[in-house]
Image: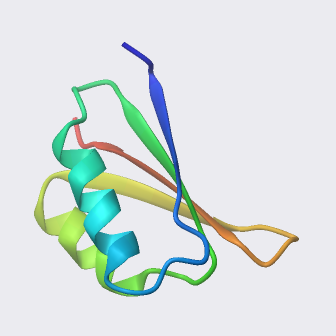
Amino acid sequence: MDKEIELNVCGLEPPEPMERVLDAISQMSPGQRLRMVIDREPRPLYRILDNNGFAHETHSRPDYLYEILIWHKV
């Protein structure tokens, strides 16, 4: 099992990025993390993560992309 899953959803039209990240986190095992790269900040995703037992960290990158790290809350 990989400790970190990479998911690049740049260039996809809504709601596909949300659908892909929700599908990916539904398959995550405890201890795994998801690193998502997207071309806009996915603000609606944060509440979904918070309400479903996931923690997250968002970083804006110099290339104007956002990198979101998602993991199960302990």
The image shows residue 39, relative to residue 8, as above or below, that is below
- Displayed quadrant of residue 43: bottom left
Instruction: For the N terminus, give its image quadrant.
Output: top left
18 relative to 2 in the view: left or right: left
- Displayed quadrant of residue 32: top left
Instruction: Name the image colouring.
Output: rainbow
Which residue is the extreme one toward the left?
52
Residue 48 vs residue 65, the one in the foreground: 65
How many marks on residues?
0
The image shows residue 37, relative to residue 46, as above or below, that is above
**Residue 60 rendering spot, x and y as whole percentages:** 71, 71
**Residue 73 rendering spot, x and y as whole percentages:** 24, 43
Which residue is the extreme one toward the top?
1
Q: Residue at x 48, y 30 (%)?
A: 4
The image shows residue 71, relative to residue 32, as above or below, that is below
5 relative to 74 in the view: left or right: right
Q: Residue at x 25, y 34 (%)?
A: 28
**Residue 12 rendering spot, x and y as whole percentages:** 50, 77
- Displayed quadrant of residue 48: bottom left
66 relative to 46 in the view: left or right: right
Q: Residue at x 33, y 59 (%)?
A: 21
Instruction: For the C terminus, give its image quadrant.
Output: top left
